Image (spheres, rainbow, N blue to C red):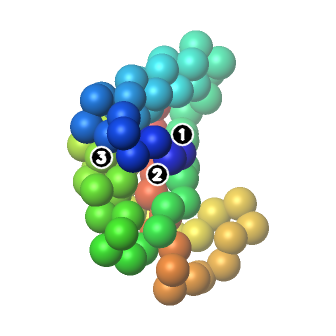
Amino acid sequence: MRTAYERRRDGIASLLLTHMLQEAKALGLVRLSLETGSTEHFEQARKLYAKFGFEPCGPFAGYGPDPHSSFMTRTI
């Protein structure tokens, strides 16, 4: 997910994550996992995901170890 620069800090990413979690629950999913960057540039994204209960995990779904990727997951 990427937020337009002029809309950052407006809460859009939080609204999208909230919506995705609600939809996942409604669909009966029990886990959501994501991949994001591991560099400093992605630090705010990783903090946002952690705020929503995502925790670091290993690669999943065909991903392999990658020094440029961070993997996170959470139960629903």
Q: As drawn, is 19 to the left or to the right of 44? A: right
First in sequence: mark 3 vs mark 2: 3
Q: Are marks 2 and 1 in contact (CB under 8 Å)?
A: yes
Q: Residues within 10 Å of mark 1 (few under 14, many from 20)?
A: few
Instruction: Kindly give the residue lying farthest to the bottom in the view shown.
Output: 67
Quadrant assignment, res 62? bottom right
User: Considering depth in this image, is 20 or 14 the residue closer to the camera?
Assistant: 14
Q: Secondary structure at mark 2?
A: strand
Q: Which numbered disc covers residue 73?
A: 2
Task: For marks 3 and 2, give the CA distance.
Answer: 13 Å
x and y percentages locating residue 14 in the rendered image? 35, 31
Residue type (three-letter) at the residue carrying disc 3: Leu
Q: Secondary structure at mark 3?
A: helix
Task: For marks 2 and 1, give the CA distance.
Answer: 7 Å
- In the image, which is nearer the foreground, mark 1 or mark 3? 3
Could you tell me if residue 21 is visible in this image?
no
Residue type (three-letter) at the residue carrying disc 1: Arg
- In the image, which is nearer the foreground, mark 3 or mark 2? 3
Residue type (three-letter) at the residue carrying disc 2: Thr
**Against 25, is 71 above or below?**
below
Q: Which numbered disc covers residue 31?
A: 1
Q: Which numbered disc covers residue 48?
A: 3
Residue shown at 58%/14% (left/top)? 26
Residue shown at 38%/29% (left/top)? 12
Q: Residues within 10 Å of mark 2 (few under 14, many from 20)?
A: some
